[in-house]
Amino acid sequence: MIDLRRVTDLWRQCDVVVRDLPFGLLLAVASLLPALHGKGTQVGDLPTRPFDALAFVVIALECLPLAVRRRWPAVCLALVSLGFALDQFRAYHVFASNAMPIALISAGAHLERHRRVTVVLLSMAYVPLALALSRLGATERVEGYVVFYLALALAWGIGAWLRSTRAAEAERRRHVAEATRAAERTRIARELHDVVTHHVTAMVVQAEAARYLTAAPDRLDATLSAITDTGRRAITDLRHMLDLLKADHDTDAGMPSAGELRTLVEQTRRAGQPVEFAEEGSPAEPAGSAEFVTYRVVQEALTNALKHAHGSRTVVRVRYGEKEISVAVSTDGSGSRAGSPGGSGRGLAGLRERVDALGGEFSADRQAGGGFAVRARVPAGRPS
């Protein structure tokens, strides 16, 4: 069987002239049918005369230029107008004269330059055409010529409307593409911030602590090992992010989930942050967007704890419900900030955007007795 989809694709790949030519040829063939003689567009009401050799030239002038009506609309309109004028003077009234409004619509839609000049020239040429037809004995009254002119103007107006509609659609697509690119850049920046900031903060804190452990070789070795492990995990996460930028990569594959929270908490403990972790229920399998956002909320909260309250008691509570995941991360304000890297506030803003995108609630506030608390409610459907 013929694959219609493939045939359609091959047809669309052809040059626009090749795709427009069949319509002109079909109109020319139809004009040769005896049943369609005298069925063309006409003005002046001159008596129809039989075909002669010039009639075939007129048909060719009116039909064949339609092949270039999108590639060279001005050329098409000029040739079709010439053929139309000859058709009216000779009173063949061939069916091919219907190409005149088609050429006007195409010119109105596809002509890029000198549009006003074209309209003025066509309007000026219409006056001597009407006068010449009157001298040849046409019985058309003045109002008839006016109505015919308005009909031609309507054809041009339809083409102009198609042009403006196409331009508006192109502008809309451009804005959508720009918004999509901006959203993608924001998403990549957010992911880089979450991945790099957490791991680098842990490494900086661990390296700072290692300066004071030269007299305790065992603890120093453990701290350096923790720095090495953190660096390796950072490299792994960055490679995963680079893989996500590939067009053929599954965006959900390898995505961190709430099920990895224990690993995240243990890594933060090795960086010297006392973390208490409580988990109720179990995350969904496979992990979805809600679990991913939950992981990022806890990750950013622990990163801020390392940066701004290193050594302070931190409590992480996660509860998996039927319809939502609740997260609460609180940190006492008694820790030391010495040597901790500063922050830009971008992380919390990114978390708010993530949670809001899922229709959840997010808050990050200082506590009355000191410290900081991050809370989030992330809507999540449970697998059946």
Image: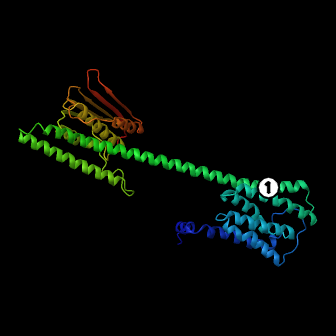
The colour scheme of the drawn protein is rainbow
Count of numbered labels shown in the rendering: 1
Asked whether, in this view, residue 271 is left or right of residue 376, the answer is left
Determine the secondary structure under disc 1.
helix
Relative vertical location of residue 384 with respect to residue 348 in this rendering, above or below: below
- Image quadrant of residue 206? top left
Asked whether, in this view, residue 44 is left or right of residue 360, the answer is right
Residue at numbered disc 1: 151
140, 120: nearer the viewer: 120
Give coordinates of residue 19: x percent, y percent: 62, 68
Residue sitting at x 38%, y 37%: 355
Inspect the image, locate mark 1, and give the three-letter code of the amino acid beneath it.
Ala
- Image quadrant of residue 18? bottom right
* Residue 201 visible within the image: yes
142, 374: nearer the viewer: 142
Give coordinates of residue 96: x percent, y percent: 77, 68
271, 208: nearer the viewer: 208
Give coordinates of residue 342: x percent, y percent: 28, 35
2, 308: nearer the viewer: 308
Residue sitting at x 84%, y 54%: 147
* Residue sitting at the far bottom: 53
* Residue 383 visible within the image: no
Give coordinates of residue 167: x percent, y percent: 61, 52
Relative vertical location of residue 372 with respect to residue 85 in this rendering, above or below: above
Screen quadrant of the C terminus: top left
Relative vertical location of residue 306 with respect to residue 50 in this rendering, above or below: above
Relative vertical location of residue 164 with respect to residue 269 in this rendering, above or below: below
